[in-house]
Every structure is written in C-alpha cells, then in structure tokens.
Image: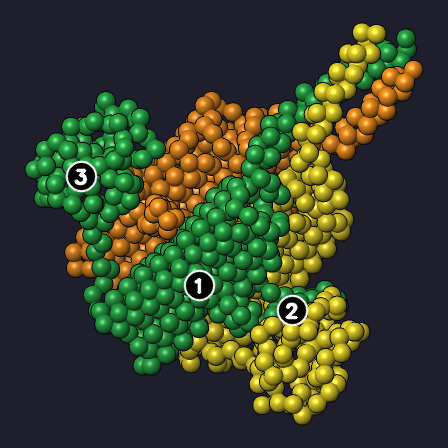
Chain colours: A green, B orange, C yellow
Amino acid sequence: MPELKEIATLIGGEWRGDGTLEIKGIQALHRAGPQDIAFVARDRGDADISAVRAGALIVAGDSSIAYANRVLVADPHLAFARLLAYFHPRRPFWEGIAASAYVADTAELGDGVSVGPFAFVGARSRIGAGSEIHSGVAVYHDVAIGRNCLVYANVVIRENVEIGDNVIIHPGAVIGADGFGFGRTAEGAAVKVPQVGKVIIGSGCEIGANTCIDRSTIEETVLEENVKLDNLVQVGHNVRIGRDSAISSQTGISGSTRIGSQVIMGGQVGIADHIHIADGVMIAAKSGVTGSIKSKTIVAGIPHQEIGDWRRNMVLARNLAAMRDKLRLLEKKIRELEEK
Amino acid sequence: MPELKEIATLIGGEWRGDGTLEIKGIQALHRAGPQDIAFVARDRGDADISAVRAGALIVAGDSSIAYANRVLVADPHLAFARLLAYFHPRRPFWEGIAASAYVADTAELGDGVSVGPFAFVGARSRIGAGSEIHSGVAVYHDVAIGRNCLVYANVVIRENVEIGDNVIIHPGAVIGADGFGFGRTAEGAAVKVPQVGKVIIGSGCEIGANTCIDRSTIEETVLEENVKLDNLVQVGHNVRIGRDSAISSQTGISGSTRIGSQVIMGGQVGIADHIHIADGVMIAAKSGVTGSIKSKTIVAGIPHQEIGDWRRNMVLARNLAAMRDKLRLLEKKIRELEEK
Amino acid sequence: MPELKEIATLIGGEWRGDGTLEIKGIQALHRAGPQDIAFVARDRGDADISAVRAGALIVAGDSSIAYANRVLVADPHLAFARLLAYFHPRRPFWEGIAASAYVADTAELGDGVSVGPFAFVGARSRIGAGSEIHSGVAVYHDVAIGRNCLVYANVVIRENVEIGDNVIIHPGAVIGADGFGFGRTAEGAAVKVPQVGKVIIGSGCEIGANTCIDRSTIEETVLEENVKLDNLVQVGHNVRIGRDSAISSQTGISGSTRIGSQVIMGGQVGIADHIHIADGVMIAAKSGVTGSIKSKTIVAGIPHQEIGDWRRNMVLARNLAAMRDKLRLLEKKIRELEEK
C-alpha cells in the first residue's frame, strides 16, 4: 500500500500531515474511511467536511480546507482521475487471439493485439499494437484501427473506417453505417442514395455505448482528436467535429454540419444540417440549433438563443397569464377613459 | 381448450353466460372471433361493443356491459395480461449450454441455466438457476445475475454489475458502460475520469432494447426493484431510480440524480444532474426537468412546470399574435386619447 | 473506364461536349478532378461553379449551367445515386454459410443466401434467396425474411417477425422486442403485459442502426413498403407507418399510432400514442405531436402547430421583453391620462 507521500508524488502535489499514512484506496468524499483518500473539487473550497472520515483529502492548492492529512494540487479532479486509474488498473478482456474469433487471412494484427471470442476481423483490416477487440465485435473489411484502442463487446465498425490511437469505443456503438440519404421520384417514392464515403476518428476519441456515427455519402465524416461522445448520440453523414469537443447523451447532429473544437453540448440537443458551430460554443441540454453560431457563446432553447435572452424570455413565457391580465386591465381602463 | 369457467378461475373472476364455452385464444376486441376472449378496459365501461364478435369478454365488476358471455374481474387489464401469458407460454431460446458458447472455468451457472451460441460468460461471473442467456450476449467478469432472468441476444453486461432475480434485459441493452466523466486541463483538453463503480439492478426490473445504464465513477448506479425502462433510455452514472418507476423511450437521466418510487415518465424526457424527483411524480413526454421536484405532482414543459400552469401558458404562447394585436390597438387608442 | 456517352446512357440523359471523355469515378462537386463526374442539384441551378475542376457535370435539363462536358437529366440527385452504385458496387460480406454460424435444422435458406460467422438462425425461420446475414446477427425462431435482404452485423430479429424483399437493416437494430406495456396493481406495482403480437416490415424498407421496432401486444406493428427509418428511432407497439415515409434519427412514435404514406419527419420528433397522421404530412425536427393531423400540412413545435403559426409565435416568444416593456409604457401613460 502506498504512503501518502508517494500518492503526493504520483499526482504531482504537496502533502501535509502524516506522510507515512498508508492509503488503501480512493473513495467518494462521504464514503471514505481512515485508509482511503478522497477529493474536494476546486470549486467546492468551502465544502462542509465536518462529517468526513477519510484518511486524507486531495484539495486545491489555494483551498482553505485544513484537513489533517491532505495533498495540495492544482486540479483535484484531474488528480482524482489519476488515482482512480492507479488503484483500479483495467483488467484485459482477453489474452491473444481467441480460437473462436474469425480473423481474415489478409488482416494484419500488431504486437499484443487481443481479439476476443466471436469477434470478426475482415479482409485487409489492420489493428495496431496493443489494441483490444472484445467479444462479438464486427470489424468489416479494409478498416484501420490504431494502437492501444479499446473496442468493447458487440461494437460494429463498417468497411473503410479509419480509427486513430488510444480510441475507446463502448459496447454496441456503430461506426460507419450508411448515412440517411434519399432522393424522391416524381411520384414521391424514396430512392436510396448509396453511401460510399468513410468515417475518420482521431486519436484519443471516446465513443459512447450504442452511439452511431454514419459514413459520408462520398466524402468523410470526421471526429478530430480527443472528441468525447456520450451514449446514444447520432452523428450524421459528412459531419466534422473539432478536437476536444464533448457531446452528451442522445444528442443528434445532422448531415454536413461542422462543429468547432472544445464545443460542449448537453444531452438531447439537436443540430440542423449544413451549419457551422464556432470553437468553444456551449449548448444547453435539449436545445435545437437551427442556424450557424459564429462566435464563442452559450446558447439554449428551441430555436436556440443566447442563454441570457433565453432565460429572460423563459421567465416571461411562464408568466404570460399575468401579462394577459394586465392587458385586460388596461383595456378596461381605456374604455373608461374613452367613455368620459 | 379451457372452458369459460376455467378461465374465470384462472383470473380470479366470476363468469356469466355459458360457462362451458371453449376458449381457443385471446384477441384484441375487434379481432376476436366466437372462440376468443377479449377485454374491455376498466375506464371504457361505456365502450361501443355492438360490432364485437368475441366468444366472451373480460369486463370490470362494476361495468354496465352486459355481454352474453363474460367474466367479471377487478382489473380487466391485469386479467388480460395473465391470459396472454397463459395462451402464449414463452418458448425457451436454447436448452443447456451451447457448444459454441464461451463460459469461463471460474464462472458459476445455477441449475437449468441456458447459454446460447456465441454467448460469453467471463471469469467468476455467477448466473442464478433458471436464467437464460441468449446468443451473442457478453457477460464480462465478476458479474452476478440472479435467478430466472431473461437476457436477450447481444446484450452487453460489463464487469462487477449485480442483477437481481426475474430481470428481463431486451436485445442490445448495455449495462455498466463507463459513465461520461471528464476533467479539463488548463488548456481545455478533455481528460477521462476512469469509471470504476458498479451498477446494481433490483429484482423484477425490465430494461428496454438498446437502453444504456452507465456504471458510477466510484459508487453505484442503482435501479431498485421492479423498475421498467423502455427502449433507448439513457441512465447516467450514479443515478438511483426508485421501485416501480416506469420510464418511456428515449428519455435520459443525467448523473447523480435520484428518482423516487412509482415515478412515471413519458418519452424523450430529459432530467438534469444532481436533482431529486419525489415519489409518484409524473413527467409528460418531452419535458426538460431542470430542478428537483419535491412533491407528488404532474409536470410538463422545458423547463418543467406544474402541468396546469404549463397548459395555460401554452395556450397563451400559441396566441401571442392576438396579444400583440391587442397591444397595438391599445397604443393607438391611447395616442388618440392623448391627442384629445 | 466508361466514356461520358456511356454514362449518359446509364443515367438516361443527354450528353454535351466530349462524349469520349473517360470517367474514372464520381466525386463531390469541389473535390472532383479532370476524370471525375460530379453533380449540381436541381435547385442549385445558379450555383457558382467557377472553381469546379470536374471532368464532367450532371445537371438538370433546364439548368443554365453551360459546363463544357455535361449530362442533362431530369433529376441530377437520382442520377448521382445511380452512378454511386455503378462506381461502388457493394462487396458481399461473406460467401455461403460460415462454419461457425448456427442454423437450425428446421430453418430454410433460399439460393445464394449467405450467413456470416457467429450468426444465429432459429427453428423454422426462412430466409429468401440472395439475402445476406452478417456476423453476430440473431434471427430467433419462426422469422420470415424475404429475398435480397441485407442484415448487417449484430442485428436482432425476434420470433414471428415478417420481413419483405430488398429490406436493409443496419447494425444493432432490434426488430420485435417486447412493446412497453404494463398494468398497475391497486398498490401501484407495475405488472408486465406479455407482448405476443408481431412485426411486419414491407419490401424496400430500410431500418437504421440501433433503431428499435417493438412487437405489438397482440396484433401487428407494421411498416408498409419502402419506409425509411434513420438511426436510433423508436417505433412503439402496434404502430403502422405508411409507404415511402421517411423518419429521421432519434424520433419516437408511441404505441398504436397510424402514420400515413410519404410522411416526412425531422430528427428527435416525438409522436403521441393512438393518433393518426395524414398522408404527406411533414413534421419539423424536435416537434412534439400531441394530436392527430388530418390533412397534408407542415407542422412544428411542442405541442405542434401549423409551421406558419409556429414561426410567427416563435418570433413573438423571443421578443417577450419588448412586449412587456410596451405594456409598462402603456400602464404609465394611462396612469397619466387618469390623473388629468
């Protein structure tokens, strides 16, 4: 078991109190016992910790919390993330290539790749060193997957998809299904437009469970580096999402839209097709974005507005009855004035 | 074929008419033929049944419907459910352990467990007596599944998940994928926070197709007993849902929110993070719940309001043009009055 | 490589310029090189093509675009679809029946059916000639699939589902899971109503990735011919959708609702249960349709309105502050008038 001073070194912080305290694990603040370490978020510098029984706390360097044993760091949340990984190393799903996996003769697997039972790796697909393919995954033909990727059970990756390094794809996600493209005959019958483009996913991306990223009709659907998608998200064909953007669950992005970098979206947002969202934009949950957003702002509502405007209008919209009553009163008064 | 009087015994009701009538099956009201039984819901006591050709009807005990052959019960809908199960016994998907399944040496399977082809059961996972694991399911390591559970094809259950008895998980559902948790570096790069908590699912729960229930960062995501989730629902990390709650399709619940018991949600509802919803609350479809709801009420809208307020405001919001026109008229009249 | 005049024949158009130009491929307008053909949509007749370097263009017959080499057609979008298929013939996923597939003895496979590794085909299920079943698909018992269908990896089709010819089902879709039907005991406990009906899918339909179509309680959930569903769509039990309708991603249709033919829905639409939507209705993204729509109109909003009304009300709703300020001004003026 590491001592507090070793923990401090690991997370690049300074310790106070008993540096030799042995730390058994990391826990939530109000669950931690005398051998656990917990953290207090930077913006909770004034949290009530009178009931905390943790052996030690990770706090921000400028925090006023004077817990007996503590480690001071610049960002307690990131230090917490680091310690979670330290105390809970991930267990590989499988070692080597399962006898019951199907790997095409022309597929190329790098050093240390593992392929679980009932996984399928198609012709000419390449999987980089250290990547894990779990059970039931289908990698179609001519796919490229980088190094140290983690592809959870029952993911489907269609042909010609390109995936960078250190990408995590959660169970059931579908990468590269056909975009939703149809023409209409003069009689109105829907006619499928074949979708022969590809999907390119940058290094460091994370794709949520049962999320869908469609292939482009003829060009590319692109996630730049380190994009984070939650579960059940829909990314339409020919969309491009900039690096470090994070998109919450059940949000949908329509075809050919361009999302900037470090954009943050809440859940159940809908984004129209063929628009541009600037870098750093934040979009509140359930918003419907119907046109381009050209500068770094925070928006909300259907259709979206700058969030301050949206809040003001929302308050008024919830009090329309009062407004109507005032109107009636004024009508009455004017009638009285007119009669005089 | 059972006679009407046997049907009555089965559903705990009283029969009227020809108790020896043989009943071949159960059908929808307007499809039922002379050997079928159908039902009239309790709140449809005044339904027009002049075109009904059913052999017999199940009606509420206090119903005024005087159909020739009928069974009187307290709740026709529950009696209908009981008869559906009687006339349509479920066929087991597979008998025993398929030769092509993978079951780890250290996994423990109870009596009568069936595991279909291409299913994966990881190390130290335990599956209780009578449970069915269908084809393509992935049960990771250290999972506990109770007795008489039904896990449909291509479900994924990640490590350390605990599932009670009599739980039904529909195809493609993902239990225990990582919660969506990220820190940000000073430069704004997203940094993954490992998700090492678990998911606990109580007995009697039902999880819809392609629904996702995320594991907690460090504590537990919990569904208490008999919670019913529809398809494509998202349950974020560290959420707790109280017993007998029912949540319709495409609804999303953000992290660390607590939902009471017997809560009912329509489809496409969004619930903010870190809030509490009281027991018995009903939430209309497409609502956006942005704060805690402290007592048993019905709410609707984005942001949510008590449903009566929402309806009144909605009517006014749809007639803003009339309000504006009135305002203009008043302006004109005042101008005239001022000029006098 | 085909010459321009052969391309013209293939898409039923007339060529202008150099009919012997060899065409290597089809590309997006601004990516096309001197051996590529591209297209200009019918409604972009005035597009700026000064930077276009394509070898040839497909344009509408009445277009004013006088590009050197071009093919005139009635509908450039449909011609483009035709050429995409010509230049990018789909590669079959698998030849024949994989040794690792499970096909029940009593299942019937037509000529040229292919079944990929780890696919499951249950008892008495029939698959028509030329259909492809990809890896990890689960076809339960007593399913009927028509000719030339394409069932992508990890799709699940539950028992008694009927599927026509030329149907495409994208990865992870779930056809025939139980509808979401519950009764409540007097104490409020949820009681499952067994779902023993079926799903019928007409010829030419396309079902998006991770989309869910629930089986009916006792009757049928029906997609008529050539219905197109995008990804992550929810179709509730006992719904009927008319031919040639197209429904975008993350839309949900509640139980027992009837949708007409050639209906078009944007993304994230929600449709209430037990209502009727007339033929040809168009529903804007994120709408909430709470009642029947009886004629061919365009609607938007929650609850839905005719789109012209919705737009007018939206403009006013976003300017409520101005309305409130006017009201205050009028109040002041009336006070002044009254004081005189």
> Which sits in the foreground, B229 or B108?
B229
> Which sits in the foreground, A238 or B102?
A238
Is C201 situated left or right of A78 in this image?
Answer: right
- Give the percent coordinates (x, y) of residue B73: 51, 31
What's the residue at 69%, 72% (across, down)?
A: C49
Q: Earlier in the sequence, mark 3 or mark 1?
A: 3
Is B213 situated left or right of A26 in this image?
Answer: right
In which chain is the residue bearing label 1?
Answer: A
Disc 1 vs disc 2: which is toward the camera?
1
The Cα atoms of the two marked residues, 2 and 3, are separated by 65 Å
Task: Assess disc 1: are there few (<14), some (14-19) or many (≥20) residues with their C-alpha within 10 Å of its C-alpha.
Answer: many
Q: Earlier in the sequence, mark 1 or mark 2?
A: 1
Task: Assess disc 2: are there few (<14), some (14-19) or many (≥20) residues with their C-alpha within 10 Å of its C-alpha.
Answer: some
Residue farthest to the front, as pictured = A62
What's the residue at 65%, 38% (across, down)?
A: C303
Is B218 situated left or right of B259 in this image?
Answer: left
- Give the percent coordinates (x, y) of residue C174: 47, 57
